[in-house]
């Protein structure tokens, strides 16, 4: 029996790939409605995404041929969903991140922050978290974690080496003191026996101290590994381009609001007004919780006491960080140019739409420009501008007639190697799936079935949805989960008289609450791969954060989310829809 189970497990991928569509065939063949056909594609993609029977980017291609073959959406209509304005915004941001990574600017910023925060383990941890958190707003969470983990490893090695060196030095001093005392005392047999017994006790105490030091060092290793992946997950919430689910909800919101002749309030500025504070609070919560479970003081006043060994450790660690920072050398012309373009991009994104009080986007009529416009403009400049300061009077070398042409700030080779192309397919496939569900009427049908929750308090419903999303994102892609539930939540909200963004934005953010498992998100997997963590460590630390994060999100939604997005107000276009639904129901 066990051998049969092992064989089945070895071919589980093939079984999932072929059995899933066979089991679901009654939907398009027997029921045959447009909604059933769309459900066939939706459920099959959900199974493939959750089990990862095939690469998630390959699964994202299914809508491009299945919806046209089933007669749900025409091919020429579904194909543009794979390259939308949202995709172009994401592409522009990621290419700028590649330029930052190419010229090692992210490492310079991270080391500089670490120098500012000091060398005490808890402050080092905060410095690592702030660096990772800030970088992950603009750079891929995976790339940020991959850059920060080696820096953390170098610090941990230095902490361990310094502790061992100080321990050996302390043992040598104590040994010399013991030998001096022996010379001064008489050599009686009983006294010798007593001395040998005392020495044995001292050896046991030393071994206990060594064990305590090893245990404490392992706790520090676990805390620092977890703090980096948690900060990366938290930082992606802060900006619109920080992580995939943010872009999914932005694209779906624009589609839904346009359907009812309304303008979506989600812009780079409005999202940052809401997400930045929430992201910072979440990061500080993670920092505090990791201190509680891993960096507890051994005594009540341990934090305030002056420990010479701890002070020496801190000085050595700070020296290592300074050496790494100085090894980078002065800021180069290329680094300054890339940073200038990056700051310009952020300024353009923030100032295009200042929440209805103006912005440079008002200079163009009919909403001609979007956030993708300045992103692509500045990205193109990366391939034009030189990486070295141009010489106005460039004279040929006296030994050579050739003048070297400096390389541009960014080469296509760098973009080709470092850009996560699969992520664009994943986002595009999600948008295509959402379009198919909407055009077929499946989203509307699901929303109507969920009207049984109409009498439930919206905030109670929001808490249930957020916990459900946070649980699902532990076992599958956060972009995939956001893509599947966004059309359903928008329909549910409209049919129950609630602003669609009230459910959509918190649910999308909940998809980033991946704290428990290595498979939940790429930063978790990277931190886990360095060997300091066990799955039980991630589950024990992440479970509490998953529980605490949702109330923090709901609190933020209530306190300042309503002010930023007018979540407690249903736009007039949606009110007409609710009235029409009520009239149809009364008939």
Image (cartoon, rainbow, N blue to C red):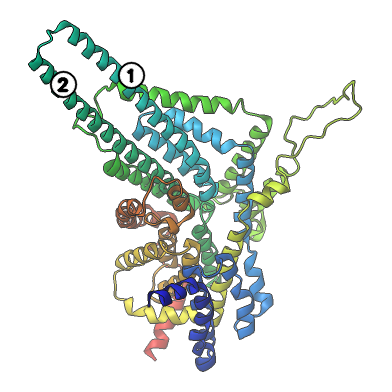
Quarter the N terminus occupies = bottom left
Q: Which mark, residue 113?
A: none
Tell me which corner region of the image, top left, top right, bottom left or bottom right, holds residue 402: top right
> Which residue: 36% across, 21% down?
312
Task: Using the image, determine if residue 86 lies above or below residue 66.
Answer: above
Between 269 and 161, the residue placed more toward the observer is: 161
Q: Secondary structure at mark 1?
A: helix
Q: Quadrant of residue 29?
A: bottom right
Q: Judge whether 354 appears above or below 75 on screen.
A: above
Q: Which residue is mark 1?
A: 169
User: Where residue 128 appears, x then y in whole percent?
Assistant: 43, 38
310 left or right, relative to 54: left
Residue 31 in the image: above or below residue 400: below
State which mark lies toward you, 2 or 1: 2
Relative image position of residue 201 (x, y in whole percent)? 16, 26
Q: Nearer the viewer, residue 53 or 108?
A: 53
Q: Which residue is mark 2?
A: 196
Q: Is there any visible trace of residue 43 in the rendered image?
A: yes
Residue extending farthest right: 401
């Amino acid at each position: 029996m066990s051998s049969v189970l092992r064989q089945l497990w070895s071919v589980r991928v093939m079984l999932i790939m072929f059995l899933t569509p066979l089991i679901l065939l009654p939907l398009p063949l027997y029921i045959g409605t447009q909604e059933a056909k769309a459900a066939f594609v939706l459920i099959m993609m959900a199974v493939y995404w959750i089990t990862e029977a095939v690469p998630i980017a390959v699964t994202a291609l299914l809508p491009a041929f299945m919806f046209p073959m089933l007669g749900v959406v025409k091919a020429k209509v579904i194909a543009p969903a794979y390259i939308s304005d949202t995709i172009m915004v994401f592409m522009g941001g990621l290419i700028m991140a590649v330029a930052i990574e190419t010229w090692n600017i992210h490492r310079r910023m991270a080391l500089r922050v670490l120098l500012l925060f000091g060398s005490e383990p808890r402050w080092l941890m905060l410095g690592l978290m702030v660096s990772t958190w800030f970088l992950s707003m603009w750079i891929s969470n995976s790339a940020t974690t991959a850059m920060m983990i080696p820096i953390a490893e170098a610090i941990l090695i230095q902490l361990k080496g310094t502790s061992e060196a100080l321990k050996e030095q302390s043992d040598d001093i104590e040994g010399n003191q013991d030998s001096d005392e022996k010379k001064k005392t008489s050599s009686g047999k009983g006294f010798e026996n007593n001395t040998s017994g005392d020495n044995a006790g001292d050896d046991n105490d030393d071994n206990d101290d060594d064990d305590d030091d090893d245990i404490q060092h392992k706790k520090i290793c676990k805390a620092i590994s977890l703090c980096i992946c948690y900060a990366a997950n938290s930082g992606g919430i802060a900006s619109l381009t920080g992580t995939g689910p943010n872009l999914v909800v932005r694209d779906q919101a624009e589609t839904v609001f346009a359907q009812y002749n309304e303008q979506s309030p989600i812009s780079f500025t409005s999202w940052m007004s809401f997400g930045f504070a929430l992201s910072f609070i979440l990061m500080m919560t993670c920092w505090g919780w990791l201190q509680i479970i891993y960096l507890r003081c051994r005594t009540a006043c341990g934090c305030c006491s002056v420990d010479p060994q701890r002070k020496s450790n801190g000085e050595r660690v700070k020296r290592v960080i300074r050496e790494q920072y100085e090894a980078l050398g002065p800021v180069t012309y290329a680094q300054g140019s890339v940073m200038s373009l990056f700051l310009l991009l952020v300024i353009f994104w923030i100032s295009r739409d200042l929440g209805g009080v103006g912005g440079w986007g008002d200079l163009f009529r009919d909403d001609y420009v979007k956030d993708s416009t300045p992103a692509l403009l500045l990205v193109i400049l990366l391939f034009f501008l030189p990486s070295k300061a141009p010489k106005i009077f460039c004279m040929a070398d006296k030994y050579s007639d050739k003048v070297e042409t400096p390389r541009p700030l960014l080469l296509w080779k760098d973009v080709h190697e470092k850009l996560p192309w699969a992520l664009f397919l994943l986002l595009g496939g999600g948008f295509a799936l959402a379009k198919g569900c909407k055009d077929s009427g499946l989203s509307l049908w699901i929303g109507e079935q969920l009207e049984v929750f109409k009498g439930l308090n919206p905030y109670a419903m929001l808490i249930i949805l957020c916990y459900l999303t946070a649980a699902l994102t532990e076992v599958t892609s956060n972009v995939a989960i956001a893509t599947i539930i966004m059309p359903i939540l928008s329909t549910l909200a409209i049919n129950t008289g609630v602003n669609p963004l009230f459910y959509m934005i918190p649910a999308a953010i909940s998809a980033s609450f991946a704290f428990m498992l290595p498979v939940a998100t790429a930063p978790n997997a990277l931190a886990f791969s360095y060997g300091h963590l066990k799955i039980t460590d991630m589950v024990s630390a992440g479970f509490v954060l998953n529980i605490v994060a949702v109330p923090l999100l709901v609190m933020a939604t209530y306190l300042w989310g309503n002010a930023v997005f007018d979540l407690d107000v249903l736009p007039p276009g949606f009110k007409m829809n609710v009235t029409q639904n009520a009239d149809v129901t009364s008939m």
